Amino acid sequence: MKIDVVNYRDDIPSSKTKNATVIVIDVLRCTSCIITALNNHAKCVTVFAGVEEARSYAERLGRENCVLGGERRALPIEGYDVGNSPLQYDTAHVSGKTVIMSTTNGSRAISGIRDSAITLIAAHINHLAVAKLANELGNDVLIVCAGTGGEVSADDVISAGAIVSDLERISSDNVHTDAAILSMEAYRLMERGELNVRETFHGKYLMSLGESFVEDVNYCFNESIIDYVPHCIGVTDDGLGTIIE
């Protein structure tokens, strides 16, 4: 099995995604929200790249049936029900409802995947479960980091490295690209206490916004507390949204 990592969402040639198990990570905080919502019994999550496209879809479904969430520059979007804090996607808010999201980086990364054998949604909170499923599927693996503003985001790379490290422990019959090796080394630095995710560029930015954001960062870097692995099942009728279960 070949294991590769793409460090940010704008660098995804179709030759890498075709027939692969693609794993999308936006650990701070989009994919952490998706995993948490579905683990808390949301009906499904539908992501849109655009703010108004997500809002329009929620209106069509009926706002009473939905939770509309997302962010721009990490802050809640005006008129949306919730922001991009995974702690807001609890059972009381999302159980039985369709969660509709638009975020700066994560939803765009998810929407940009084409021709994969399957697209899985990962974060630090479910990294071991993702690795186990990817190993069972047996395809080549491409881990796509959403990044921040079209640049590498160390928090995503660390979580990608956690999955690569898990796969290494599960099976030694893997071939790693250099990008996969580097991500695994970043994760091992964190394990040894030599790299603090709270000191990364995006981590520091979030925590500067207030105590609730500090709680988000702490939650998002819990190690494999959730066994659920969401996957993309298709697109909305208008082709603008990606549906995840």
Image: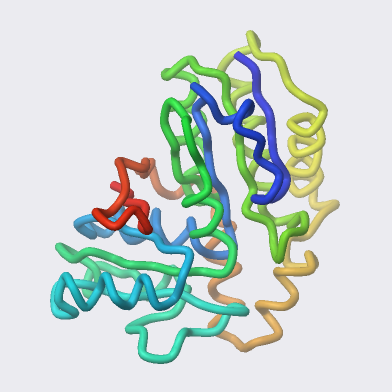
Give the camera-side residue of 105 and 53. Answer: 53
Residue 76 falls left or right of residue 11: left
In which quadrant of the rendered image does the N terminus lie?
A: top right
Residue 207 position by quadrant: bottom right
Residue 119 position by quadrant: top left
Residue 199 lies, with reference to residue 43, above or below; the image says below
Specify whether residue 145 is in view: yes
Residue found 64% across the figure and 39% down from its top: 162
Residue found 21% across the figure and 74% down from its top: 92
Specify whether residue 157 is in view: no
Residue sitting at the far top: 173
Residue 38 position by quadrant: bottom left
Give the camera-side residue of 60 and 195. Answer: 60
Residue found 54% across the figure and 45% down from its top: 24
Name the spot of residue 111 as percent of width and height, x first.
Answer: 47, 51
Give the camera-side residue of 14 and 192. Answer: 14
Name the spot of residue 55 as percent of width and height, x first.
Answer: 33, 77
Residue 200 falls left or right of residue 9: right
Residue 53 lies, with reference to residue 132, above or below; the image says below
Name the spot of residue 212 as percent of width and height, x first.
Answer: 54, 83
Name the spot of residue 193 as percent of width and height, x first.
Answer: 80, 52
Residue found 33% across the figure and 61% down from its top: 37
Residue sitting at the far front: 238
